Image: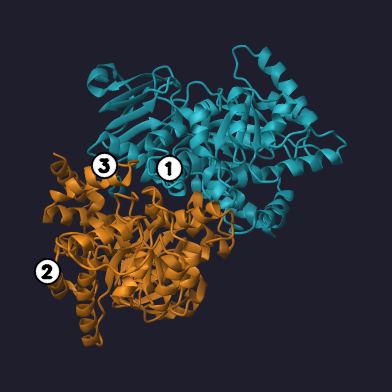
Chain colours: A cyan, B orange
Amino acid sequence: MNLAIRGRLAIYFDSNLKLHIIKDPLVLVEGNSILDIDSFSKLKKEISNHDIIGDENQLIIPGLINCHTHLAMTLFRGLADDLPLDIWLRKHIWPLEDKLQANDVYVGAKLGAIESLLAGVTTLNSMYWYPSSEAQAFEETGLRGMIGAPVITGIAELPEAIEVIEKHHNTIQDRLRVSLSLHSPYTVTIPDFQGANDYLKEYNESQVDKPKILLHTHLAESENEIEQSQKLHKEHGIEFPEVSTPTELLESTGILSEYLLAAHCIHVNENDIKILEKNKVRVSLNPLSNAKLGNFMPPVPKIITDISSVGLGTDGPASNNTLDLFDTIRFLALYYKGFLHNPTLIKAQEVFQLATIGGARALNWRGIGTLEPGSLADIITINLKKPHLTPKNLDDSILNHFAYAMNGNDVENVVVDGKVVVKENEILRLDVDQSINEVEEATNRLLS
Amino acid sequence: MNLAIRGRLAIYFDSNLKLHIIKDPLVLVEGNSILDIDSFSKLKKEISNHDIIGDENQLIIPGLINCHTHLAMTLFRGLADDLPLDIWLRKHIWPLEDKLQANDVYVGAKLGAIESLLAGVTTLNSMYWYPSSEAQAFEETGLRGMIGAPVITGIAELPEAIEVIEKHHNTIQDRLRVSLSLHSPYTVTIPDFQGANDYLKEYNESQVDKPKILLHTHLAESENEIEQSQKLHKEHGIEFPEVSTPTELLESTGILSEYLLAAHCIHVNENDIKILEKNKVRVSLNPLSNAKLGNFMPPVPKIITDISSVGLGTDGPASNNTLDLFDTIRFLALYYKGFLHNPTLIKAQEVFQLATIGGARALNWRGIGTLEPGSLADIITINLKKPHLTPKNLDDSILNHFAYAMNGNDVENVVVDGKVVVKENEILRLDVDQSINEVEEATNRLLS
């Protein structure tokens, strides 16, 4: 049976970045894609035996896209906050990660997927250990996304990563992709970056009609990445190039391309931004995590003006501490206004774009992040009949509510790949309480 | 019938700022106060024919305290965002406020009170026009708080404000107080500040056992307040003192005292902070609003270290855009870590303190913001059995979830003055949809 979605208002950017606002809309879904979207009065005659969800209180928008997280880190949420980064990592997170088993990652990722779907995230890009466990979580929850095949010099090697790609890339009815996750320029050597990139280029050139693989890395997140990288290369007896920023370092290796997704991009200067855009590098901004970890903040106003493919990420739930992209959306909309004393910076429409079509561009994933006919049916509806989303007299108000007042809990229905996964605030076919209990048991064991 | 509240954990600061964490707690309420709080096993024999709310998933904490807002500005939420402050005020807000009628303020304040209660705010301090309309909203919704009797030179005069105090101060079973709301040092002249302060001193000295009146003002919110104040005084032919900051200006008038509540305090230098503390001035910090309006940001780390009575405010819902204090709590916990590159600044425990007992101190309201026996029964419970509040293995995690993961929607039960006003996420005895409709009708008329 096909699906039809009713609402009070539909808002989306199309793939040419044109904003569409449709009053009293109807969305017709056929299979896993959007057949049509227009006003109810125009399309109502097309409804035959459709399942109808939504009502006159719903805002219909594309599912949100979380471009960078470490999904299973739900296991560590809130365990150790307000600490220096070094102590947080070395004394708390890493010792726990040393004890991780595949099942921990499965239960952590499953809970993270449930949390994400309930908050209106329909596509999510994760980088973590035990990617097959994460794949299982995507399969069972109905979430769309990308998992990482990890590469860290001396710890996780390329051949193993290639196995993950061969096993999981473009599986689960095309809902799941795999990235080559080369952790960072200070944990992966230049030859390892180049080796991975050679494989990626060959793979992508041989796959004409299929989704390409991305290389996913942390770039310029912390201050001393060049020194750390120099140290790494010295330990491995590898000559280090004459560069002064992590972006220049990656450029020198020849791996910058439209297949690179760089997360964070905090310590990037004007020249770095030019380098990234010239090479069509994709960027995930994770400003809420950057603030919480006390990092410097990325030059967001410049990045979103100068770089074409930019999306938003929550980062891992141990450094955020939620997977609710609305928290990141609001923080981004607010932070730079205060920081740069300019209330016109990072407007509501801009954060809406970053969280939807921007995310699709960042992940190089055609057909998501929009509601235009022919696109994939990843759609959420938000109940506007709430005190904190009142009044809604003006269409502009709804975009402002999106940026400054909504949170994931306002999401009422979630459709991924044409299937209803959340209906009237309840996730279907999954036992949320059981998933919570599984994580608490896993965390108990890890802490013991 | 008396009330008993069960939970998984209770957390509160007592009036000596000592943190208490009670596992498997029971709270006994008698009339409008807390009779006792301890572990369930110790107190269970005291339960006779109590009404019992809560369960083993609930976190029990004091009701949150919103120290500065303009409650009825729900009417203007989201109507005009991302604009320069001047244009926002002069082209959008003020023309709408010119059309305001008493009933608009009533419906706007009522919706704001409902929104606040649903998000766990049990005490709220508002400054707005038509205070009697706001008083009606407090009475009908069961919220505790303070309304402002407005004084603006040339627009609203002291005698009228005194009438508001005489009519509403310490009414509605002591749930409602009135402040003398002298808008700011640039809209109120020195003689008007002094006249109001003379009245206040006399009133407070004559009321031995009754709640004192506070003087509530915006202080050092925008950059050029001294110049604006000079202009105001010139227009009224009043000599202007030799001062360089708004704080020095108020000090020169002799009105600084423990009865002054100063909202914002952005442009305060080290000497100003000394002056404020020396005079026992109370402060409401409203960092989320400050960011959204593109103001400079207040020196929060210094203010909370050096000043004794500091609470948090949302500011008006047109400049936030919610009345959910959790949004302000999280923004505060995150902003300064990022801004000052220090993840140890503004810890979870500190924001919890500011939002509870700190707010009680800022409003000079004895018996709220804590759960210690004998205090007023303003209590909220938060359902911890949620994906985004998992895991909860450590007590510390719960405080971290408070700062970094909770939002108002997680609040399940709300008790004000011993009465249950929100039960299992539903506000009792009030029609939320009707209140939403009333605001949309009022806003429609104002926009027309």
Q: Is residue A198 rendered to the left or right of residue A30?
A: right
Report which residue position mark 3 lands on: B79
Residue B73 percent location from the top left of the image: 24, 52
Choose top left, top right, bottom left or bottom right for residue B69. Answer: bottom left
Mark 2 belongs to chain = B
Q: CA distance from mark 2 to mark 1?
A: 40 Å
Judge depth for marks 2 and 1 and give the one in front. Answer: 2
Q: CA distance from mark 1 to mark 3?
A: 16 Å
Q: From the viewer's side, name the closer residue of B239 and A244.
A: B239
Q: Is residue B410 rendered to the left or right of residue A243?
A: left
Q: Is residue B323 rendered to the left or right of residue B169?
A: right
* Residue B19 makes an appearance in the image: yes
Residue B73, compared with residue A184, is above or below; it is below
Q: Secondary structure at mark 2?
A: helix
Residue A313 percent location from the top left of the image: 53, 39
| Residue A333 disc label | 1
| Residue B258 disc label | none
Residue B384 percent location from the top left of the image: 47, 57
